Amino acid sequence: MLTNYNFFHKKQTNQILLINKQGIIIDSESDLFIDSKGKHLSDLHPFFDTIIPLLNTTNKQYNFDCINLTIGKNTRTVDGILNTEDEHAVFVFQDLTEQYILYQKVAQLRNEAEIKSQLYYHINYLLKEKEAFKDDFIANFTHAIRMPVNTISGFTALLEDSNLEQSQRYNLNIIKNTNEKLRVMINEILDISKIESGHFTINSIRYNLLNEFDEIISIYTKKCEKKGLKLNYKIDEKCPKYVIADKYRLAQIASNLIGNAIKFTEQGSIDLNVVCKTLTKDKATIQFSITDTGIGIEQDQLEVIYKSFYQVSNKIRNDGSGLGLAIVKELVNALDGTIEVNSTLGEGTTFTVTLDFEIDKNQKEDKHITKTNKTTANYEFKILLAEPSKRDQAIFLESVSKSKKFDVVIVETGDDVVEELHKQPFDIAIFNLKLPTMDGLDTARYIRHSDFENFKQIPIMILSKHPSKEEEQYCKQRRINSYLGKPYDKDVLLRKIKYLIKKKQAN
Amino acid sequence: MKISKKIVLLGHFGVGKSSLIRRFVENTFSENYKVTIGVHIFKKNVEIPEKDTDVSLVIWDLEGNDDINNTRLSYLIGTNAFIYVYDVTRPATYENLQAEIDFLKEKQKNTPIKVVGNKNDLVTKAFLKENNDNFGRLTDLYVSAKTGNQVDFLFSKLAESLL
Ligand SMILES: Nc1nc2c(ncn2[C@@H]2O[C@H](COP(=O)(O)OP(=O)(O)O)[C@@H](O)[C@H]2O)c(=O)[nH]1
Ligand SMILES: [Mg+2]
C-alpha cells in the first residue's frame, strides 16, 4: 500500500496550461502537451472542446477527475482543475496514470465477477427458449403425422373387410402392424416431449392403492401367461389402503416397467415386489421392484438406458420407439421419486422405483363419495364433451339443457379427455371426430385399450361435421357406441344419450 | 466554426457503451471486455445530408456504474444529449431504468435522453416483446455493437435532432 502513496507523492508534478478567453494557449508547462504554446485548445484533444465554453466564466473552478487523454499512441490519465479568471483561465493537472492503472485492475476483476454472476439469468432463458422451440416442433410434427397414420389405419380396416386372397391378407397384416408400431411411437414421442417440457400435470386423487395393485397384477398375469411366463408378486401388508396420489401416472410407470420386463424375457418369471419402506401418520414411502429373468443389460449400458431414443442393443427385435424407460424416468422425477436399475447379463434385470404417497386420513371404505358429495346433486348424469369449437359447444349445451338432467364437462382436446376421465367418473363421453392433439377416434381407441376398468367401457358417441355412411361404419367397428352427424336434431341427440346411458346401467 | 455537440454515454458497466462508440467511430468490435475508468473522449464528424451540413460529435464514454448517483457530475457539463445504455440480457442493468433516467432529467433539464437496449443480437424479438413492461416502454431503440445493428442510425438521428 505505502509504496503506492510514496509513488504518488514523489512522482507527480503539476502541469499547467494558461489559456486566454479565445482558447489560445498563452503559456504552458507540460510534459503531455509539449510545444503547445500558441495552439488552440481544440487542437490538443477533444476533451478541451468542453472546456472552451467555460472560458467565458470568471472566478469559477471546475474539477475534472480521471480524464483519459490519448495523444498519439500514448494514453495518460489525469486529474485537472480549471480556474477561470478575468482575462485568463488556468488548467492545472496531474498525470496519475500509474495510480489509475492499479485502480483499473481492481475494477476489472470486480466487474467481470459481477457480470459473470448475472449471466445465469440469460443462459437460463436461452435454454428455455430452445427447449420450447424443440417441444413445439415435436408437438406440431407428431400431430401432423398422426393424421396420415390414422388414415392408413382407416383404409387398412376397410381393406380387411373386403375379399382378399391369402397373400394379400398377409401383406395387409404387415402394413397394419407396421402402422400400429408407428402410431405407438408417435404417441410416445409426444408423451416424452410433453413430460420434458413440463406440459403435463400431476392429478392427485384419493384412491385404493391395494385395489390398484390387484388390477395391475390381474392385467399383467394374463399378459405373462400369453408368453408362457409367470408373474409372482408380494405386496407388503404395511402398505396403506387409501392414498392421495396420481393414479394414472403410477399405472403408467408400472405398465411401462412390467411391459418392458415381459418384452425382454423369453422364459422364466417376472417378480413384482412392493415394500412399504417407511410409514408415518400421513406419508408412506413405497418401493416397487420389478425383476425379470430376461436377457439383462450390460453394465456399461446401464447409464444410458433412460436416454430418449435409446434401445438396448440386442438381437431381439423390439417394438416401440425406445422411449418407455425415458418416460418412466421423467415421470418418477416429476413425482419426486427415485429409480434404480441392477442387471446381470443373461440372468435378468431389476428396476426399483421408490415413491412417496400421501395417506388419506379417511381409511374407511369409499361408498361412492364422489356421487353423494357432489354439489351438482340434482343432476343425474355426467357428460364429458370434447369439442374444440365454441359455437358447437354452445349448441350442444343448449340441446341438453332442456332436460336438466345432465351435468356437462367440456374439454377441447383428446389429451384433456384422458386427463378428465382419470379425475372423475362420467356416464358418457361425446367427442367431435376432429380434436386437437389426439383426435376423437384415437381418444376412443385409447379408452378402449386402456387398463382402467372404471372408464374402459364408457359409452362413446362421435359427432362428425362431414358425416358419411363409411365413416359411421368405421366408427362402429372401432367400438364407438353411437355416431351422429352435425347439424343434429336436439331430440335425436337427447334420445341417443339417454339410450346409451340406460344401456350401460343395465349391464 | 463547425458545429460541435457533446454526447455522453451512461449506464451500468459492461452494457456496451465503449463498444457502441468503437462501432460508431472505428466500425470495429471486440469480445474482450476492458473496464473503462474515468472517461474517454472521442470525436467524429457526421454528415447530415437532410440538412445539408455536418456536425462534429464529441462523445464521452463514461465509466460504468451500478448506481448513477456515483457519476462525476463535472463530466455532464455542457452535454447536448445523453445516451443511456442498458444490456437486454442483464436485468440488473435495467432494473432501475426509470430512476436513472429521472436522475439525468433532474441534473440536466431539457437535455434529450435516448434510452437504448444493447446486445440485441443475443435475444429474439419475442423476448423483447415479453419484456415490454420491464424495459420496453422506456426504450427508444434496440441496438447491437456486435453486429452494428442500428448503431449508425442511433448516432446520426441523434445528431440530426440536435441541429
Ligand atoms: N453480444 C454482444 N456483446 C457485446 C455487445 N456490446 C458489447 N458487448 C460485450 O460486452 C462487454 C462489455 O462491453 P463494453 O463496451 O466494454 O461495456 P461498457 O462497460 O458499457 O463500456 C464486452 O465483452 C463486449 O464485447 C453487443 O452488442 N453484443
Ligand atoms: Mg466502457
Image (spheres, rainbow, N blue to C red):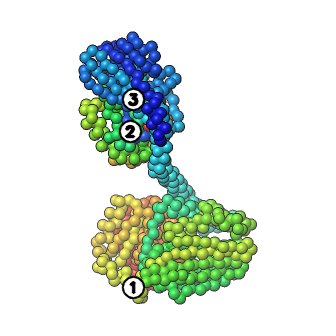
Q: Nearer the viewer, mark 3 or mark 1?
A: 3
Q: Is mark 2 within 8 Å of ligand 1?
A: yes
Residue A317 is at least partly visible in this image:
no
Q: A120 or A199, which is in the foreground? A: A120
Q: Which element is circle 2 on?
A: loop
**Which chain is indicated by disc 3?**
A
Q: Which element is circle 1 on?
A: loop
Q: Residue at x 61, y 62 (%)?
A: A307
Residue A330 placed where, x, y %?
54, 66
Mark 3 vs mark 1: tell me if same chain. Answer: yes
Mark 2 and mark 1: Cα distance apart in space: 61 Å
Looking at the rendered structure, the kind of residue marked 3 is: Asp
Residue denoted by label 1: A362
Q: Is mark 1 within 8 Å of ligand 1?
A: no
Q: Is residue B109 left or right of residue A257?
A: left
**Which chain is indicated by disc 1?**
A
Q: Residue at x 45, y 49 (%)?
A: A118
Residue denoted by label 2: B11
Mark 3 and mark 1: Cα distance apart in space: 80 Å
Q: Residue at x 33, y 74 (%)?
A: A406
Q: Seen from this angle, which residue lies furthest top?
A: A38
Q: Is residue A406 above or below residue B127?
A: below
Looking at the rendered structure, the kind of residue marked 1 is: Asn
Residue A189 placed where, x, y %?
56, 61
Q: B27 or B9, which is in the foreground? A: B9
